[in-house]
Amino acid sequence: MSRLEVERLSVSFGGVRAVRDLSFSVAEGEILGLIGPNGAGKTTVFNLVTGFVRPASGAIRLDGRPLVGLKPHAVARHGLARTFQIVKPFPRLSVRENVTLAAFLRHPARRDAEAHADAVLERVGLAHRVTVAAGQLTLLDQKRLEVARALATGPRILLLDEPMGGLTPAEVGLASDLVAGIRDGGVTIVLVEHVMKAIMRISDRVLVMNQGEKIAEGPPSRVVEEPAVLAAYFGKRRVA
Amino acid sequence: MRRAAPWVAAIAAALLVPFAGPGSFVLHVLILVLMWTTLGAAWNVLGGLAGQVSFGHAALVGVGAYTTMILYLKLGIAPWWGMLAGGAAAALVSLPIGLLCFRLRGPYFSLATLAVAEIVRLVALNFESLTNGPVGFLITALPPLHLGGWAVNWESKTPFYVAAVLLAAAALVSTDWVKGSRLGAYLVAIREDEDAAEAVGIDTVRVKVITLAHSAFLAGLGGGFYAFYFRYVDPDAVCNIGLSMEMVFIAMVGGLGTVGGPLVGATFLTAVAEVVRGQLGLGHLVFYGLSMMLVIRFMPEGIWGRVHRLLTRPRGAAADVALGG
């Protein structure tokens, strides 16, 4: 059964059709890579699915339950968490406090929330930095914190928006392992990423967008050979 | 309550002050400080803890003051009950205001509160059958009150002082309680990054509306006390923008989001106001503005915040806008 279903989703911003008639589904336990050139609408898809932007039309279902019209906090409560492409830590709070705030969603008592936060921080490799102010972290650690905070809300599905953007190749390796590990822990994942090597390695399936539309979908190795994908990335003439 | 004992001690000590036999002028100044503490703390709950800057809190003070006046002069309900009703009325009025204004963020929210305050002022000015319009309300005699067989003497400042202590205590203790609670943690998250707060499952609008209601209740209480103590209320006294600014001033100068800040800010404001009015007899608002600029430039964490930091934090340690701190 599919965990997340998106059906004929569309939205426009001032005449620009940012997402057009987009349908896809994500199976339980899957890692779906969402790729496409800049401006393809990938982050907009995340904003639509998580309730930050309301779609003009279309349906979104999480385990069969409709999400359209819900505010982001309600979407999170239903078990769908996200990270932001441009990290949004609570900069003056410590790492532990950042994650504790997210853990409150499933653990109302402060002691439980803090214990859960510590466990999540251990898992993403931030256990040694719990007392540091989030704004003081390196970019890699801020990306880890972003993932930790999303994980601490106890999601069934996690939407990661460029968790590897701006990282060094060695760091990309660490981040890929982290993402794969989260999936192995039972969380379904949708991943927007520009680092092709990483996305090709860890995705079970890849969906390619261009100008708001789906142009290809399938296993990574096959998708990279599709003419439409090559055209979107490299231009038409080279393919023709 | 995390630290009940210090609070009980502080409140008890404050209540003992009249026994030391201060003159009525000293008590009057203390009453003003405590009233301003309540109003500054009311603003601080929303503006300091949640980072939602309101320029219209005078509207809520006005609702409290008018409720107290109307209940007493038209229905004969004693003003000490009227104060509580004023707080409740202000909290009630704040709900639709919150639901409307919190659709906006940052400076747009602030501008919306300014507009709401102006609407409330115009209602107070023009809805004459309810508010007496520009004439306002005057209490000529307070109703008799007997406490434990003693008749309260309304000519003395002491009963007002006791009421002011209790009000300020309610404002500061409730701030402390919120800061230590899960709600307080949510407010910090909202202040730091609203999108991130939503993303981790915090219903930011609901949390802000609840906090505005808390803030409004305290502002309404303060307004009710104003009516009770000064016995005179008109739109200029309780609905003007100067009052809104004074509440902002107290919270900022004292220390945004700190528990004790409003008390420090109120002391400072009252001192500046008395000195400037007495010595120069001109625009005390100019001096508020000047001192606010100086504080923002040189002490953005406010007087209380600076002192608290110097006393508690070793130099160079991580920021402690801790969830419970």
Image: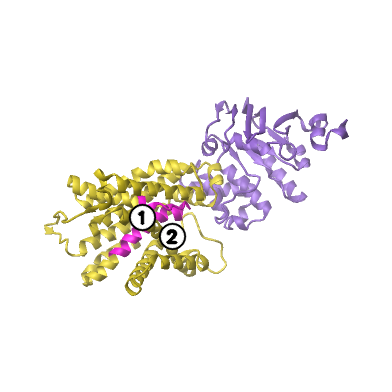
Residue drawn at the location 78% of the way across and 41% of the way down: A197
| Chain identity of mark 2 | B
Task: Pinpoint the chain carrying mark 1.
Answer: B
- Foreground label between 2 and 1: 1
Q: Is the residue marked by circle 2 packed among few (<14), some (14-19), or many (20+) residues within 10 Å?
A: many
Q: CA distance from mark 2 to mark 1?
A: 26 Å
Query: Residue B43: percent from the left, percent from the top?
Result: 40, 55
Q: Which numbered disc covers residue B258?
A: 2
Q: Is residue B58 magenta?
A: yes
Q: Name the amino acid type tagged 2.
A: Thr
Q: Which quadrant of the figure has residue B199?
A: top right
Q: Is residue A161 magenta?
A: no
Q: Is residue B9 visible to us here? A: no
Type of amino acid under label 1? Asn
Q: Colour of chain A?
A: purple
Numbered range of the magenta stretch: B31-59
Q: What is the secondary structure assignment of the residue under circle 1?
A: loop
Chain in yellow, by letter, is B
Label at residue B240: 1
**Residue nearest the viewer, comparing B232 with B43:** B232
How many neighbours does mark 1 have within 10 angstroms: few (below 14), some (14-19), or many (20 or more)?
many
